[in-house]
Image (cartoon, helix red, strand yellow):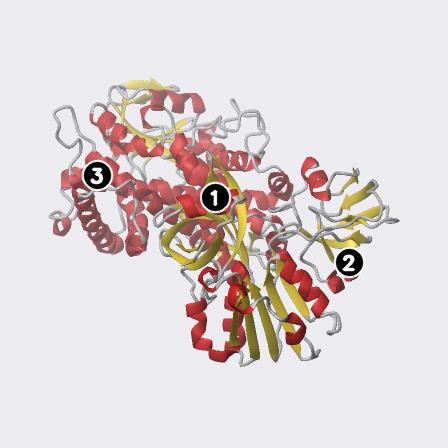
Amino acid sequence: MTNTIPSAAPTGRCPVAHGFDAMSDDYYIDPAQHFARVRDERPVFWYPWLNAWIITRRDDVLRVLGDWTEFSSSGNTATIEVPEKYRDIVPPTLMSLMIVGMDPDGHTLHRAVAQRGFTSARMEELRPEIEERAHRILDKLEGRGSANLMEDYCLELTTQTLCAHLGLDYEHDLMMRRLRGAMGRVLSSAQEEMPAEVVDEVWSVFSSSFAELCAIVEHRRQHPGRDFISEMADVKDKSGGYAMTVPEVALKVCELALAGADTTAQAMTNAVIFLAEKPHFITEAISEPSLWANVFEETVRRRPSSPFASRKAMRDMDISGVQISKGDMLWVSLASANTDPGHYENPFEFDIHRPDPADHLAFTRGRHTCLGQSLARVQGATGLKVLFERLPSLRPAPDFPLDFVKMALLPVRTNLPVTWDLDDIERSKRLVKREMNLTVIGREDLADGVVGLRLAHPDGDELPAWDPGAHVDVRIPVDGGEVIRQYSLSSSPSQTTEWRLGVLRESAGRGSRAVHDSVGAGDRIRVGWPRNNFHLEPSPRYIFVAGGIGITPILPMIEEADAAGADWTLHYGGRGRASMAFTDELQHYGDRVIITPQDECGLLDLATIFAEPRRDTLVYACGPAPLLDALDIALQSWPAGALHTERFAPKTIVLDEPDVEFEVEFAESGIVASVPAGTSILDVAERNGVTALSSCKEGTCGTCETRMISGSADHRDSILTPEEQEANRTMMICVSRAAHGCGRIVLEA
């Protein structure tokens, strides 16, 4: 951008601030600092470019925002001029009915309808979905090492969240993105003349999007759902008629498209710029996630996404010694008020530890306090939390460009290039817990006592990628609470929009009984990202062994081995043919699959199957403990590392001597702590605020696997092979301890 001095005809109004220029680079770099250069000398000044008075001091700003009878909002949108060719779609008088351009009683009615969807409680319910969507966006970005943060992450996240809240699926995604950009131009045109060369483009996009929205609102009015558009469309007035017309509801959606997406995205990118100057705040907030809310509040204090709010004077008056005439437009500077040294100590310092982080005017005050502030706060804090937990090294690129759409009222940053270290990817897999709400799109009985659940994103988006052998944590509602259980993915990794789980009903299993009795098609369940401790290693030949429900992780392994051209055989045993899931699915593999129902053929003859050791063969097995224990014996003469197993229950550990206390050093956290007998390393980590993921807490899921830097472990998990345990590269900190004689273990945590 370059400096552009507005050329405006003299108006005779005074005082003016000759150093103020809302079209200059200096303003777009830091609006608050730009105001500070004129505030003391000209707290109220005439700005010919906008044909309005600029109010800079906090007390004066509060006065203007606090009294709608003296300072009206009616001038904010009434002057928006709809080009004649678009008036059949967008009636000229409609634009005056934006909430930001209304006074009571109309404002009271429209705000009452719209605010139903933005209660703090309702927004908090959105937090897990926002977090999930943030993770999904970063899954697609993280491998690149660089991005345009504004477009690729911030706007992507806020637009997706808003669409979910409005009940708009991917079919309407492009429309909402185009509307989002056009709406800012339309709103700003009430005060700033739109450049002639973009008028037709902007109104073409806005009117076509508006027509599409009206059709959606009309359909939701006739066929209401549980979404916010349906809720607004269905509100009745005292006479029993609809409180708002279809175009009025559609206009509210347009306002939300701007306020709910762009302004929060602007705040998130601003936060990244501020945090680059204070990187220790990133470390603090990662360690104490509640601080992300402070980061967001301090960001919008220091640089509000909307630097101004505008009002019209309803009578002649004096503000800070300047005479204002009835009908004059007033632009109150939120950016200036938020850095007024009369109210804030060190006002230009970015400090997330201010005593009252929310003490600012970024969301204005009075009747026009920002309707969507609760959404902005949840989106902003959650989006920043996930971003830096996943990519803590992320920083703006050196000498990043000053790319803005030049609007004084709503300066829109269009580009913020950022880079990060690719090492962040593996780190986050160890330390960041990821979950998502999935819909059960199908349920079927796979065998006696076995049900299959097909899961997909509610919006049909792609699911996280996974490899054969992966499992997921599933939160299952049970008796008013929930339990977490691990289930293997039994579908194909090539099915990117759908997962399948097979669940065996166990008489003593609260989770499995709840799945069988209570979970059905259409239900939502919370599921973690895939994890894999049962990787299929490349080999020219495999022998697969499955016992009962242990077939679930083996199915995708067979598919991959077959696709790779490997020679393979599956031995599948079970109590009876009727209880063995997926047998029909396996038929097309022919005689490579050997089905052995116990009631017909007896137990699998492991001694015969593995009588001849082979160096070119890997064995993968999953099933009940007796089967896996028998395999350990049957393969004793096979090469080390040939057998790979996954257990549903932990191995029985026989201790030769009692546990003793030892020390653990968490290298990344700089914490050294004692681990008493009877206490796990995981327990000690959690007590000391060390980030450590966990799930089963019995050594079977692998979630808590942690890299060892030094020391020797007494491995008590059911995952690592004997060779992996002997190597002492990682340990499961939920069950394993320091080996006897090892006084301290140093971990990468």
- Which one is in front, 255 or 547? 547
In the image, 679: left or right of 468? Answer: right
Q: Which three-letter amino acid code belongs to the residue tagged 1?
A: Ile
Query: Regarding mark 3 in the picture, which secondary structure is present there?
Result: helix
Residue occupying the point 17% across, 38% down = 94
Please report whichever mark, 1 or 3, sits nearer to the chain's N-terminal start.
Answer: 3
Query: Regarding mark 1 in the picture, which secondary structure is present there?
Result: strand
Residue 203, percent across and down?
Answer: 22, 51
Label 2 to label 3: alpha-carbon separation: 63 Å
Q: Which three-letter amino acid code belongs to the residue tagged 2?
A: Asn
Circle 2: is it few (<14), some (14-19), or many (20+) Cα within 10 Å? some
Circle count: 3
Query: Regarding mark 2 in the picture, which secondary structure is present there?
Result: loop
Please report whichever mark, 1 or 2, sits nearer to the chain's N-terminal start.
Answer: 1
Q: Nearer the viewer, mark 1 or mark 2?
A: 1
Residue occupying the point 47% across, 57% down = 502
Q: Which three-letter amino acid code belongs to the residue tagged 3?
A: Val
Q: For the residues labelled 1 and 2, say whether their Cβ atoms are less than 8 Å apart.
A: no
| Residue 326 in which image quadrant | top left
Reading the image, the residue beneath label 3 is 249
Residue 129, percent across and down?
Answer: 43, 44
Q: For the residues labelled 2 and 3, say whether their Cβ atoms are less than 8 Å apart.
A: no
Circle 3: is it few (<14), some (14-19), or many (20+) Cα within 10 Å? many
Residue 640, percent across and down?
Answer: 74, 71
In the image, 380: left or right of 659? Answer: left
- Which one is in front, 274 or 442? 442
* Residue 728 badge: 2
Q: For the residues labelled 1 and 3, say whether their Cβ atoms are less than 8 Å apart.
A: no
